[in-house]
Each structure stands twice: as structure tokens, then as C-alpha cells.
Image (cartoon, grey):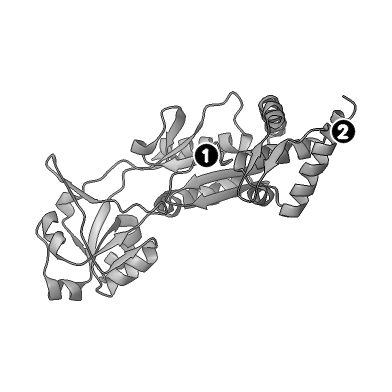
Amino acid sequence: MERTMRASLADLELLAAVARHGSFRRAAMEAGLSPSSVTERIRALEDRVGVRLLNRTTRSVAPTEAGAALLARLRPALGEIAAALDDAGRAGDSITGTLRINAPPPATQLVLAPLVSRFLARHPRATMEVTSESGFADIVREGYDAGVRWGESLARDMIAVRLGGPMRYVLVAAPSFLESVGTPREPADLLRLPCIRTRYSNGTLLPWEFERAGETVAIRPDGPLVTTDADLALSAACDGVGFYLTFKGWAQPFLEAGRLIPLLPEWLPPFEGPYLYYPSRRHQPAALQAFVDLVRERGARS
């Protein structure tokens, strides 16, 4: 018992981070340490405990039976310690710590960005780490406090708070391109015209969906360009490469400048905006609760 009591809280948190990520490198990035430093500290922790806690291979890291048993008891304790520290921060009316959020690029740029600036101005001792990616992340397993997704993608066991109002897609093309290939009158016309497609980080190419008067049409057009980058796609659309379906907020500057023309607006009605979501916990991190309060405050004013 005397030998195990010398394990520091920081080292136990490192052990939990390595197990959560299945990687010394990612745990090191989260802690702001070098991978070699994390490896040495975990090895020293195992020496103090007197048993191997992690199995290491060249491809993966996973808890041993003893490590899994230790972590099962540690995680609730570490959560309670973090909650106690957060409560102490609330008592001093000072929000500190790092708020980690995972969000898709459209939500990051069109909805989240102004909230981030306002939050950091209101709580100067807090920090935010925002990961912008189009794939679906397991926010609990990957160590995020919250995520952002559209309603149809939310898990039922998550608390969800609306981030903003309705949004719209817009189908766009350059004026010179329309003079060359003609203007589509309905979605099916796009199947014989060059289009610019978006591939998500998980490799998915989603169909283009249109809706009018209760009729839904989903198509998979072809074209000379497929990209994960919205800026590249918009630039290519301005240059006459093809038709492009994107968020209206992204295309708005080009529409206002006359470089792109909106098409088939009657087939692209508004849809519900994204949600901030997070797991239900007895003690929410103070920074997360403060951000949720800001989101709800903004919603009450809109």
C-alpha cells in the first residue's frame, strides 16, 4: 500500500489518457508532453504499483487485466476530482481550464466561430480547443467535452442544445459556365452536367438531396472534381469547373459579388441548424457549463 500511494494524480491522469486514446502519442499531445516523457512516467508508475498496467505492441496500446481493473476504479474518482476543482472555480466566479469541442467545418465556421470569440472574451482564463472534422467522433472516448452535429446524427443519450437558427443549401455556378452548358430546370438535369462533389473525411460521398412540395429527390451527379475542401470547391465553381451544392453561408460572398449564381432555390428549403451536444453527467465541467449558458443566452435573444 505504501508503494502505490506514491503515485501522483498527474500520472494517474496520464494512464487514463493513454488508455482512452490507445496511444502514447495522442495522450502526450493532450497533456502537452513528449511521447517519450509519457512512456517513462507510465513505466515508473508500473514500477511503483508493481504490476504491468498497459500492454504495448507496435500498433496498439491497451490495458492489462490489472490496468483495466485499476482504471475502472480510477475514472469515477478522477471525474469527481475534476468536478470538485470546477466547483471551486465556480465559487471564485472564475472559469478556467480547457474546453474541447469537436465540430464539422460548416458548423465551426458559420455558427461556432462567433460564440468562441465571445466565450473567450467573457472568460479570459479559459482556453478552447476546437477540432474541425467532417467525420463522426466518439466525443467521450476521444476526450472531448462536447460536439456539434445536426439533429439526425445525435445519439439519444446526449444532451443537445440548439446552436443557431435554420440554415440553407444553395446550388451555384459561374455565369460564364451557365452560358456554356445551360441552366438546369430540375435536379435530374444535373445528372448530365458536370458537378463538383464533396468527399467527407470518412470517405463518404453523400447524394445531393432536393425537396419541393413534399417531394424529395436524391441524385448522385458526376463531375471533374471531388474534394474535401470547400474553399477549393468554391474557387473551382467560380472558375467554371461545375455546379456546386454547398451551405449558403459559405457561398454568400461570391453570390453578392456576382461570381456565382444561385439555382433551383425552390428545391432547397431551410433546414434545422446544428446542435451542441454533450454527455449527461452529475458534474459538468465549469467551462462547458459556461459555454452552454452562453449558447442558451444567445438563443433567448434570437
The percent position of residue 254, horizontal first and vertical second, equals 31, 67
The nearer-to-camera label among 2 and 1 is 2
Please give the residue where the numbered disc 2 appears in the rendered image: 6
Question: Mark 2 vs mark 1: which is more N-terminal?
Answer: 2
Residue drawn at (20%, 50%), measured in percent from left and top? 268
Res 43 seen here:
yes
Give the image quarter of residue 195. bottom left
Q: Which mark is residue 139?
A: 1
Position of 28 relative to 281 (above/below): below
Residue plotted at (28% across, 43% down): 271
In the drawing, what numbered circle is on residue 218? none
* Quarter placement of the C terminus: top left
40 displayed left or right of 82: right
x and y percentages locating residue 237 in the rendered image: 28, 69
Q: Residue at x 38, y 65 (%)?
A: 231
Q: Tag 2: Cα neighbours inside 10 Å, few (<14), some, or many (≥20)? A: few
At mark 1, the secondary structure is loop
Percent x, y of residue 45: 81, 38
Left or right placement of residue 64 versus residue 279 in this view = right
Q: Name the residue type under label 2.
A: Arg
In the rendered view, would you say 146 is above or below 209?
A: above
